[in-house]
């Protein structure tokens, strides 16, 4: 894990923590349920009956999905193009790092 990946992990953890501390609330009454806004866990909005677990779960799932995508994107070497093979100084034909002579023109390789 590199520094950027560590940042992605911490950012995801922070976003999940914020969501858990400020969950979405739901109000249950005789007419059914209605969604309330997000509110601090120790100070639920007025008329709140319970935490809307499914909405909270979706939010956390989104955070993990984005965090996971960032983690993979930040993987070392994930975005670098493949290094070009060295070419023969005489004819430009690529050669293996262990080659002593060029396959194309027979030029001696340093
Ligand atoms: Zn050559």
Image: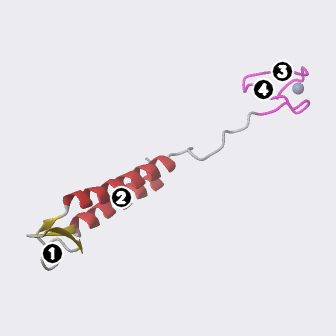
Give the image location of residue 14, x and y in percent: 32, 63
> In the image, which is nearer the foreground, mark 3 or mark 2?
2
2 or 1: mark nearer the eye:
1
Q: Nearer the viewer, mark 1 or mark 4?
A: 1
Task: Looking at the image, tell me whether mark 3 or mark 2 is earlier in sequence order.
Answer: 2
In the displayed structure, does residue 62 sit left or right of residue 56? right
Q: CA distance from mark 2 to mark 1?
A: 24 Å
| Image quarter hosting the C terminus | top right
Q: How far is disc 3 from disc 1 in space, using C-alphas?
A: 76 Å
Above or below, 54 relative to 88: below
- Residue tagged 4: 95
Q: Earlier in the sequence, mark 3 or mark 1?
A: 1
Q: Which residue is mark 1?
A: 44
- Relative horizontal placement of residue 19, taking residue 63 as reference (left or right): left
> Can residue 6 be seen from the camera position used here?
no
**Which circle, 2 or 4, is nearer the viewer?**
2
Task: Judge: label 3 CB < 8 Å from ligand 1.
Answer: no
Q: Quadrant of ligand 1?
A: top right
Q: Verify CB contact (< 8 Å) between mark 2 and mark 4.
A: no
**Image disc number at residue 101:** 3
Going 85% across and 22% down the picture, which residue do you hit? 102
Q: What element does badge 3 sit on?
A: loop
Which span of residues is magenta-colored? 86-110
């Amino acid at each position: 894990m590199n520094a950027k990946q560590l940042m992605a992990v911490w950012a995801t953890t922070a976003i999940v923590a914020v969501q858990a501390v400020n969950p979405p609330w739901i109000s249950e009454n005789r007419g059914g349920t209605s969604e309330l806004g997000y509110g601090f866990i120790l100070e639920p909005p007025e008329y709140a009956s319970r935490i809307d677990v499914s909405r909270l779960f979706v939010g956390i799932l989104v955070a993990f999905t984005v965090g996971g995508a960032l983690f993979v994107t930040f993987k070392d070497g994930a975005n670098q193009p493949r290094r070009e093979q060295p070419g023969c100084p005489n004819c430009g034909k690529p050669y293996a790092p262990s080659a002593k002579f060029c396959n194309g023109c027979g030029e001696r390789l340093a």
